């Protein structure tokens, strides 16, 4: 009997993945899959799926399409970790900054910022608002 906690992969006649996930009760013309043994499942194109996850620094690397290794008794998917190019790192840094700027605009738009900047006397403005205004200016100054 199969291990129902595992994922399985169904390969079509050309070796292409047609299904990946928890083993269904039946699929296409085959019923009672969950009562079959792994060798019987392999004979009709179903193989256990093994995933090898690799830790990586998400700031400097990204995950590409996993590397698939079809073996006689299982299919192994191994994470393919690729380093960002210098240009991608630069773009990521800019995107992070831009997201921070957008988030800082919530509750204090650029218009409000300009109004506060234009006030000659800020004595009536709450200190928390002035601190937030300064934080926005400091963030804007860090543009990559």
Image (spheres, rainbow, N blue to C red):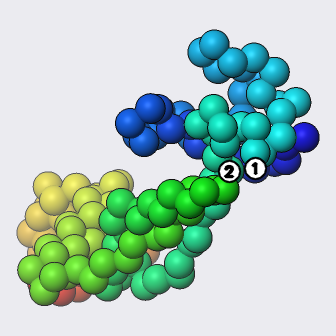
Q: CA distance from mark 2 to mark 1?
A: 7 Å
Total marks in image: 2
Judging by the rendered image, the residue that carries numbered circle 2 is: 48
Whole-percent x and y of residue 95? 21, 68
Residue at 9% from the left image edge and 80% from the top image edge:
87
Would residue 141 be visible to someone looking at this image?
no
Whole-percent x and y of residue 109? 22, 55
Q: Is residue 108 above or below residue 28?
A: below
The mark nearer the N terminus, 2 or 1, is 1
Judging by the rendered image, the residue that carries numbered circle 1 is: 6
Q: Quick one: label 1, few (<14), some, or many (20+) residues within 10 Å?
A: few
User: Which numbered tag is attached to residue 22?
Assistant: none
Q: Are circles 2 and 1 on residues that touch, CB within 8 Å? A: yes
Residue at 33% from the left image edge and 65% from the top image edge:
64
Between 82 and 126, which is closer to the camera in this rendering?
82
Indicate the quadrant where residue 106 lies.
Answer: bottom left
Between 82 and 71, which is closer to the camera in this rendering?
71
Whole-percent x and y of residue 115? 14, 61
Q: Is residue 133 above or below residue 42?
A: below
Between 67 and 111, which is closer to the camera in this rendering?
67
Q: Is residue 109 above or below residue 82?
A: above
Q: In what element is the residue under mark 1?
A: loop
Locate the C terminus and report the quarter of the image it occupies: bottom left
Mark 2 or mark 1, which is nearer to you?
Answer: 2
Locate the N terminus and report the quarter of the image it occupies: top right
Residue at 46% from the left image edge and 83% from the top image edge:
56
């Amino acid at each position: 009997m199969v291990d129902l906690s595992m994922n399985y992969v169904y390969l079509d006649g050309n070796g292409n993945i047609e299904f990946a996930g928890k083993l269904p009760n039946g699929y296409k013309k085959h019923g009672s899959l969950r009562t079959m043994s792994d060798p019987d499942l392999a004979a009709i194109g179903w193989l256990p799926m093994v995933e090898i996850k690799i830790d990586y620094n998400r700031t400097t690397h990204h995950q590409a399409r996993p590397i698939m290794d079809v073996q006689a008794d299982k299919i192994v998917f191994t994470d393919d970790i690729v380093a960002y190019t210098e240009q991608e790192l630069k773009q990521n840094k800019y995107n992070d900054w831009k997201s921070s700027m957008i988030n800082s605009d919530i509750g204090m738009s650029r218009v409000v910022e300009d109004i506060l900047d234009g006030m000659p006397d800020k004595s009536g403005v709450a200190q928390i608002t002035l601190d937030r205004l300064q934080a926005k200016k400091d963030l804007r100054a860090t543009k990559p």
